[in-house]
């Protein structure tokens, strides 16, 4: 339990430490650079979910039927998802 707590604290401190340079440079960063940094961080998050989170969820998952409600149809239909 202590290792988990230490790891969580180190992760939080590292995140805060990574944001410190932006705090000092916030006024000098142009709108274009903010867009570039935002796109880069979004790409990292998408890569993390595609490479590790989604395949792991598909391995642990099972078949689920999601009900789809539409105003154009009177009866419910389902969207089957196979997770094997």
Image (cartoon, rainbow, N blue to C red):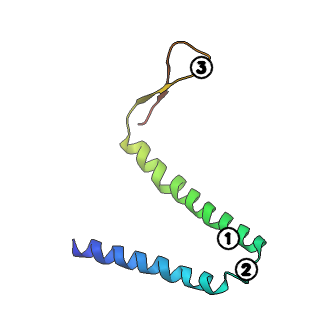
Q: CA distance from mark 1 to mark 3?
A: 41 Å
Contact? badges 1 and 3 (CB < 8 Å): no
- Say which quadrant the N terminus sits in: bottom left
Q: In the shown orientation, is residue 17 left or right of residue 22?
A: left
Q: Taking 75 as reference, is 25 above or below it?
A: below
Contact? badges 2 and 1 (CB < 8 Å): yes
**Dot 1 alpha-carbon crowd within 10 angstroms: few under 14, some 14 to 19, many 20 or more:** few
Q: CA distance from mark 2 to mark 1?
A: 10 Å
Name the residue that disc number 1 marks. Answer: 37
User: How many marks on residues?
Assistant: 3
Name the residue that disc number 3 marks. Answer: 71
Q: Nearer the viewer, mark 2 or mark 3?
A: 3
- Taking the spot 62% from the left edge, 81% from the top edge, the residue there is 22
Name the residue that disc number 2 marks. Answer: 29
- Taking the spot 58% from the left edge, 64% from the top edge, the residue there is 44
Q: Earlier in the sequence, mark 2 or mark 1?
A: 2
């Amino acid at each position: 339990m202590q290792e988990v707590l230490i790891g969580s604290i180190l992760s939080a401190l590292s995140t805060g430490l990574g944001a410190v340079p932006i705090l000092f440079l916030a006024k000098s960063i142009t709108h274009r650079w903010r867009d570039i940094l935002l796109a880069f961080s979004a790409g990292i998050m998408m890569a993390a979910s595609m490479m590790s989170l989604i395949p792991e969820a598909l391995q642990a998952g099972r078949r689920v039927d999601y009900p789809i409600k539409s105003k154009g149809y009177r009866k419910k239909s389902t969207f089957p998802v196979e997770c094997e």
